[in-house]
Image (cartoon, rainbow, N blue to C red):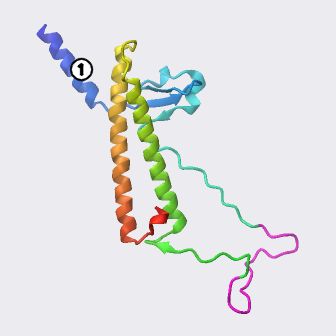
Amino acid sequence: MKKSVLLLVALALLAGSADALMYSWTDEKGVINFTEDLGKVPAKYRKSVRKLDEEPPPPTQVIEGNEPKKGESAEPKEKGAAGTPEQGEKKEKKSYGGKDEAAWKNEFGKLKADLQAAEEQLADTRVRLTDTSKMPRQEYLSLQNTVKNLENRVEQLKKRLADLNQTADRAKVPAELR
C-alpha cells in the first residue's frame, strides 16, 4: 500500500514538472484538440498542428508600391515650386525610440493578438474541463497540463505587453499607435 502511494506521488510530481511539448489542432467541427504525442494527431490535421510553446508565425505583410506608368521614371518626383510635396509624395514618417510608427503599431498589434488568442484558447480548455464525466483520465491530466502551460503563456505575454508599454512610454509613443 505504501509503495503504491509513494509511486503515485512520485508520478504526479514528475508529470507536473515535466516540460512536455503540447500540440493543438482544430478539427472539422471547430473543436480545438490537444495532445502531448504527435502520433495521436489524425493524419489529415498534421499539417495544421501547432506546438503550444512556440510563437505563432508573424502575420504576412503585403507592401504595395506604385509602379511607374509606361514612359515614366521610377525616381521620386521633385517638390513643387513652393517647396510643398506634390500629390504622389508621402510625408516623412515619425520615429520613436528608433522605430517608425508602423513598427510600433505592428509590434503592439501582434502582441495583443497573441495575448487574445492565448486567453481564448485557455478559456476553451477550461470549458472542456468542466464536464469530465465521459473523459478518460489521461485526457483530463493532459488538459490540466495544457491549462497550466496556457496560464504561463498568458502571463508571459502580459509581461511582454507591460514591458513594451514601458518602452513606448520612454520613447514617448502616442497612444493611438499602441
Q: Nearer the viewer, residue 129 or 18?
A: 129
Q: Nearer the viewer, residue 133 or 5?
A: 133
Residue found at x 52% / y 31%: 49
**Residue 44 appears left or right of 82:** left
| Secondary structure found at label 1 | helix
**Residue 60 appears left or right of 125:** right
Within the magenta stretch, is there residue 154?
Answer: no
Q: Which residues are magenta?
A: 67-85
Classify 157 as above or below 68.
above
Q: Nearer the viewer, residue 165 or 49?
A: 165
Q: Quadrant of residue 128?
A: top left
Q: Count every numbered label the image shows and give the total.
A: 1
Q: Main secondary structure of the magenta part?
A: loop
**Residue 44 appears left or right of 77:** left
The spot of residue 91 in percent (x, y) is: 62, 77
Badge 1 is on which residue?
A: 11
Classify 31 as above or below 65.
above
**Residue 168 appears left or right of 177:** left
Outermost residue on the right side: it is: 71
The spot of residue 69 in percent (x, y) is: 84, 69
